[in-house]
Image (cartoon, grey):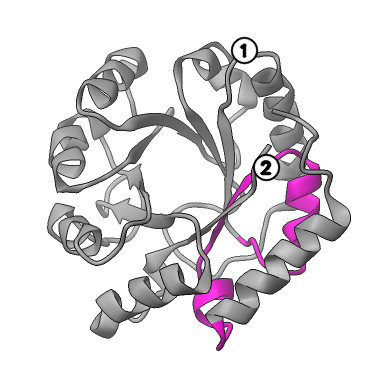
């Protein structure tokens, strides 16, 4: 199981976004995470396909686009065409997830299913074999800088067991309140991709932060465990 660090540009300085994305890549980040919010599914508005297209022009890193929107099927094509490598849709918002997964693949991207902190993991169990990625929200979606909800940790562990039962690699992403203090707990419960927003962009030294994250993972988590 390979670990990946995915800075969330929701916490970046949007006045110098291109510079921030380049700096994250130079620091050793693995992915760029993009939170898309429509002001309906979550009480906030964020970025659209034009920003994703602009980010794609300044980085070679994969773009992990998380759609926190109502009726996400409407947005698959615009974000895929803008450069999304992975598109995450919420089980709470998607009426026909399998159809959306098929469309995401046809558009050349990886499908991801997402669930909120209060959503039971059983709601996605049948969908795990159909995706390339599962994203577990460990804060209530819509705003950055929240503390990790620790009752979500058993959910991570349960989904990791389902993933490990598959015959192919499926990433388990944790998003919300992930920082140096919570990293070990989420990794030991099965996450292998760590979305980090304020912890990353407020660290002051992105390269040093990435080095500290990797050192913590190497010291406390067996990378050969799990999928």
In depth, the one of 118 and 179 nearer the eye is 179
Residue most extreme to the bottom: 204
In depth, the one of 125 and 214 nearer the eye is 214
Tell me which residue sits at (83%, 49%) in the image. Answer: 221
Q: CA distance from mark 1 to mark 2?
A: 18 Å
Dot 1 or dot 2: first in sequence order is 1
Horizontally, is 10 left or right of 84 in the view?
right
Q: Is residue 184 magenta?
A: yes
Bounds of the magenta segment: 177-205
Q: Which residue is mark 1?
A: 167
Tell me which residue sits at (73%, 49%) in the image. Answer: 186
Horizontally, is 86 left or right of 125 in the view?
left
User: Crowding near pointer 1: few (<14 within 10 Å), some, many (20+)?
Assistant: few
Could you tell me if residue 71 is visible in this image? no
Q: Percent from the top left, x then y, of residue 108?
A: 24, 29
Q: Which residue is mark 2?
A: 191
């Amino acid at each position: 199981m390979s670990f990946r660090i995915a800075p969330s540009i929701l916490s970046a300085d949007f006045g110098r976004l291109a510079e921030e994305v380049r700096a994250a890549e130079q620091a050793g980040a693995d992915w760029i995470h993009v939170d898309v919010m429509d002001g309906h599914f979550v009480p906030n508005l964020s970025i659209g396909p034009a920003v994703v297209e602009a980010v794609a022009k300044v980085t070679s890193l994969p773009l992990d686009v998380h759609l926190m929107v109502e009726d996400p099927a409407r947005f698959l094509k615009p974000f895929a065409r803008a450069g999304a490598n992975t598109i995450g849709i919420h089980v709470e918002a998607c009426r026909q997830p399998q159809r959306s997964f098929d469309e995401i693949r046809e558009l050349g991207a990886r499908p991801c299913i997402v669930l909120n902190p209060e959503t039971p993991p059983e709601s996605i169990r049948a969908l795990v074999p159909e995706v390339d990625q599962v994203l577990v929200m460990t804060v209530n979606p819509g705003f950055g800088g929240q503390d990790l909800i620790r009752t979500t940790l058993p959910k991570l562990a349960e989904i990791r067991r389902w993933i490990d039962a598959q015959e192919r690699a499926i990433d388990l992403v944790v998003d919300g309140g992930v920082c140096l203090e919570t990293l070990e707990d989420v990794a030991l419960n099965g996450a292998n991709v760590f979305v980090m927003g304020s912890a990353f962009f407020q660290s002051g030294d992105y390269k040093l932060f990435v080095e500290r994250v990797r050192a913590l993972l190497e010291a406390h988590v067996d990378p050969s465990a799990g999928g």
